[in-house]
Amino acid sequence: MGGKASTGISRRAFIGAATVAGVQFAVFGLAGCAPSAQGESGKAGGFTAGTYTGEAEGKFDAIVVETDFTEDSIAEIRIVKNGDTARIAQPALEKMPERILEAQGLGVDTVTGSTLTSMGIVGAVASCAEQAGGNVSALKKKGAPEPSSEHVDLETDVVVIGAGAAGMGGAIAAAQGGKRVVVLEKNSNIGGNCLVSGGYLEYLAAPDSARPDMTPELERYVADVLASDIAASSNPEVVQAVRDEFEAHQASGATKLFDSPNYYALDFAVTAGEGLPVESYLPMGRNISALNEWMTENGFEWITPTFAITGYQYPRWSGPAEGVNGEGYFDFYDKVISNGTMDVEIYLAVAATDLIVENGAVVGVEATAEDGSTYTVKAESVLLASGGFSGNSAMLKEYNTEWPYPESTIPTTNVNGHTGDGIAMATKLGAGVVDMGNQMLFPFNDPVNFSFEDIMGSFGDSPVVNQSGNRFVDETTDRFTISAAMMEQTDNLGFFVCDKKCSDYPSEERQETLLRRGLLYKADTLEDLAEQMGCDKATFVKTIEAFNEAVHAGEDEEFGRYLFTELSSVEEPPFFASPVTWAAHITIGGLSTDESTHEVLDEAGSPIPGLYAAGETRQDICGVGSMADGFAAGTAIAAR
């Protein structure tokens, strides 16, 4: 039985139309502590002086605030508790209390990119105001500021649109090359999707000390990649280079994981399900290796040993040793920028709206800030790094060629802002696009926030069952195949199952929150876990017992899986189950570009002078590895 790297691999099988009945958006109320009598009707003030505690839902948990009132004003607001993603939530935690205090009202604007946290703070303060006897309805009518009429003119060498992985990589590389750089970010924080992505980056330059052992199962995996139908039809020079490298690795007596940029490219072409040829991955392999080395030289600390993730089972992945998900990358970038001599200015909550063109060349950007002020930024080069369009349901459906999307809004894992802005600005100028229907879903997200930050278990390793208690897919195959299988399940819903061995993430405190919110189940027996999940007990127990037998045998005859780790089995209580569903994750298609220069090409294939693209904004490049593409783009721009 072949695993996902076997010959004749199926690239995305889809059956029938799917609905998203099990995928419901959360509607957060503003309920907090029990209120007391209201103040005088129609007036926002009229409080009973004192300190009150209130709470309301943020994105991931309740936000708790303490608010001090005098008889006629809101005097002070303190955030006591919040569980939202730090870099995304922080601007709201800082700005929302200030806005409410300044306005003495609750009708203030939310912070761009941190809407749910902002709403949670407003709701919690509203609860406090109600307890203090204030007129909450009147307070909600106070606070909306008048738009600013200020206009700002800037001049620089390079303007980067987007402060995510690709944008920050590009900004730093261009600045290191001596360029003055201005970065425009539409959200109120840097980081983009990297903050909620898990933060996984290929560590191709890892030393042996950072690599896991090369097991017989991984040797079999490499052999399957080389023997696959896709390898047989790929560039023979690349395939032969991988074969030579692998044979040399075996002959050397090396015991650690085999890898190389060539093998990375062939592995992705064969197993990722993205439908791209090996040539598409070769530059990325080289760029990631170069970025790995630069990061290590500049003090970046990696998680070791490297590991596998959902959809990519070869254990070459790592991430920041400190910080949650991808936040550690941007902590690192903060240090690099602050400790160096690089000229990088970052403007947050400033959204690029149009490209400025003079004499056929792009020479800058028009932008609008959250407060209404406008910017004109003139530059020799403009780098589009605003991400893909997985947060734009209309655009996903417009270009979709394969997924049975629902008529309703398509759920997404993306943070605010990934709506194809850079692609739209460039196509207005006649830029070409490539492979726009190539859209990757992520199959395992919680069904409230569509986030995988809180899923318990080992991605690509732990078993997944449907509501009947049956497994329905090889958990080690590609994301396209898993997502298609998830779409076929009742309510598009499944459960990620694990045991005590996986209980170190998320934290115990976070687990308690998830249990309370119904986003995690925990039991001392499989039977009790099945009852909480709503599965048939006998079916579920039989499924898990069969899976455990496959783990110990090293072979899963039902789905052809043979990659397992010490975390795979579900045998040690307590047992856990996380409800999961699919959501739009990555768009692989994008702007047509020159691979070496990163210049954006028009529909006829000619460069648009002054315009460049990196990361998910352009074709073929996606994920945290976008920072390597951005770094390569910034280097290319600096060299011109």
Image: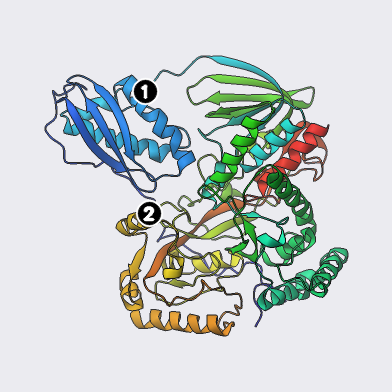
Which residue occupies 31% across, 32% down? 78
Residue placed farthest to the top in the image?
Answer: 150
Mark pair 1, 2: CA separation:
35 Å
Spot occupied by residue 518 in the image (x, y as percentages of width and height):
33, 59
> The N terminus appears in which quarter of the rendering?
bottom right
User: Which of the numbered marks, if any, corresponds to residue 367?
Assistant: none
Crowd around label 2: few <14 · some 14–19 · many ≥20 (10 Å): some
Type of amino acid under label 1: Ala
For the residue carrying disc 1, how many other residues have a C-alpha within 10 Å: few (<14), some (14-19), or many (20+)?
some
Examine the image and state in which quarter residue 505 appears: bottom left
| Disc 1 target residue | 144
Q: How many discs appear?
A: 2
Residue found at the far left of this picture = 37
Camera-nearest label, 1 or 2: 2
> Which three-letter amino acid code belongs to the residue tagged 2?
Arg
State the residue lying farthest toward the right: 237
Of the 4 image quadrants, the one containing the C terminus is top right
Q: Secondary structure at mark 1?
A: loop
Q: Is residue 219 found left or right of 100 in the rendered image?
A: right
| Disc assigned to residue 510 | 2
Dividing the picture into quarters, in which one does residue 170 lie? top right
Asked whether the viewer can see residue 263, the reply is yes
On the picture, is 191 further left or further right than 591? Answer: left
- N-terminal-most mark, 1 or 2: 1
Q: Is residue 463 above or below residue 197?
A: below
Q: Are dots 1 and 2 in contact, CB under 8 Å?
A: no
On the image, the x and y values in percent for residue 284 come to 74, 52
Check the image and report above or below for 125 versus 576: above
- Under circle 2, the secondary element is helix
Residue 429 in which image quadrant: top right
Question: Foreground residue, 624 or 567?
Answer: 567
